[in-house]
Every structure is written in structure tokens, then in C-alpha cells.
Image: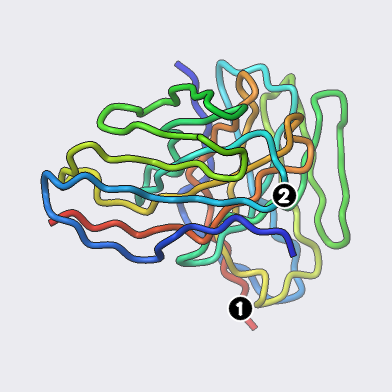
Amino acid sequence: SQKIEQNSEALNIQEGKTATLTCNYTNYSPAYLQWYRQDPGRGPVFLLLIRENEKEKRKERLKVTFDTTLKQSLFHITASQPADSATYLCALDSSYKLIFGSGTRLLVRP
Amino acid sequence: DVKVTQSSRYLVKRTGEKVFLECVQDMDHENMFWYRQDPGLGLRLIYFSYDVKMKEKGDIPEGYSVSREKKERFSLILESASTNQTSMYLCASSQYSGDDGYTFGSGTRLTVV
């Protein structure tokens, strides 16, 4: 069956370090993958989209990689700040709709 | 600032009631979606629509229906609310291609008692 896996354990890091979040999937062949940020009690906010033919995408302090052979995407936040603390969701396109992972909570300590 | 607006942030309804959740977007997006979000289960797609008067079932449509009479408005209907429909409901919209991601509303936290 189709599955998207994100680490359910929170990631706890020190301010200034690089946060790396993982998204693994099985039984999908997505044309693209997206990452979202969600704060408590709010809707997700779109961050980045990466296509299957792109290895890497950057936006300011964010970097996303997409390995269709490993069926994995990595999401990096460099020089992390306490304001980056949130839950991060990956989402795959499946027949023109998005299927979401359950998210990984990131906590950046000052 | 573009927006997806959900009519209520918090809603409490009784078991068996018919419940309407309204969603309006001002971006002229073709696509609209309804998800529910539960702890540990993530976002699950209930219904979506690619055009006016058009609807498609998502992964968990049972107990729900939708209506899209106008491009900007997508309504989720709980025909007879049950306690297992207590959840956070999120509406989203996107352009046809989906390239710019989805824009989500702030969500409606529905409690069925």
C-alpha cells in the first residue's frame, strides 16, 4: 500500500545548527513533492516544491533534495532560529491531489 | 493578501445534526480541497473539486458530502454528525497545475458531542 513516512519523534536542536528532516515514501511515483510548515492551531503554509527531475531546490535558508531512487526527500533549515520551531509536513502529488505525511515537529532551542 | 477563509474557527454540534462547513477563496483557483487532521494520522483528504459543480471522493468520504456551486466556494456537509467526526477540518485551494502549492485556511475545529 502507499505510504509516506516522516519521523514522528520531535527533532530538538540548538539555535544556529542545521535541521534535517526526512520524508520517505513507498509505492508512489510522484511528479513532485512539496514541503509545508504548520504552527499549532493553524493551517499548513506552503514552503517549497521540487519536481522529480530536480535533485535539489533552495530558498533562502531552506534546501530540499529529492531522490526518486531512494524514494526520499530531505528538508534542511540552515542557521536555524527559535522562530523555525513548528511542524513540517511533506506532501506528494498522487493523481493531481496531494497526500500528506503526518509531519515532524522541530524545536529550536535558543 | 490572498486568502482561504473558513467560516468558523470553533464549532460544537450534537450527534445527528447536519453540519455545514464553508470555505471561500479569493484567488480564482480552480481546485479546492477538504482535509481533516487528527493527531498521529496527519491530513487525510475527504473530497476535492477541480471545477464548479464537480467533485471527487478523496480517501475518507464516508459520512460527508460537498457542494461547489460557485468557483470561489466549497462547502463540506456532515449529513449526520457523529462523535468520530470530531476533528480539525482544513480547506485548501490551488491553481490547476498545483505548482504554487496549496493555500490553506486556518481550519475549523469541530467537536461533536
- Relative to B99, residue B113 above or below: below
Residue A70 drawn at (x, y percent): 70, 24
Amino acid at the residue labelled 2: Met
Q: Which residue is mark 2?
A: B27
From this viewpoint, which residue is outermost toward the bottom? A110
Q: Total label count?
A: 2
Residue A30 drawn at (x, y percent): 68, 22
Q: Which mark is residue A99?
A: none
Q: Quadrant of residue B41?
A: top left
Q: Quadrant of residue A84?
A: bottom right
Say which quadrant the N terminus of chain B sits in.
bottom right
Q: Is residue B5 left or right of residue A69?
A: left
Residue at 52% of width from left, 39% of height from top?
Answer: A101
Q: Quadrant of residue A13?
A: bottom right
Residue A71 drawn at (x, y percent): 67, 25
Residue at 44% of width from left, 44% of height from top?
Answer: B42
User: As rendered, which of A105 and B74 lies closer to the eye?
Assistant: B74
Residue at 80% of width from left, 24% of height from top?
Answer: A52
Q: Which residue is mark 1?
A: A109
Q: Chain of mark 1?
A: A
Pair 1/2: label in front: 2
Residue at 54% of width from left, 44% of height from top?
Answer: B73
Could you classify mark 2 by the number of other residues whose Cα lies within 10 Å: few (under 14), some (14-19), or many (20 or more)?
some
Q: CA distance from mark 1 to mark 2?
A: 37 Å
Amino acid at the residue labelled 1: Arg
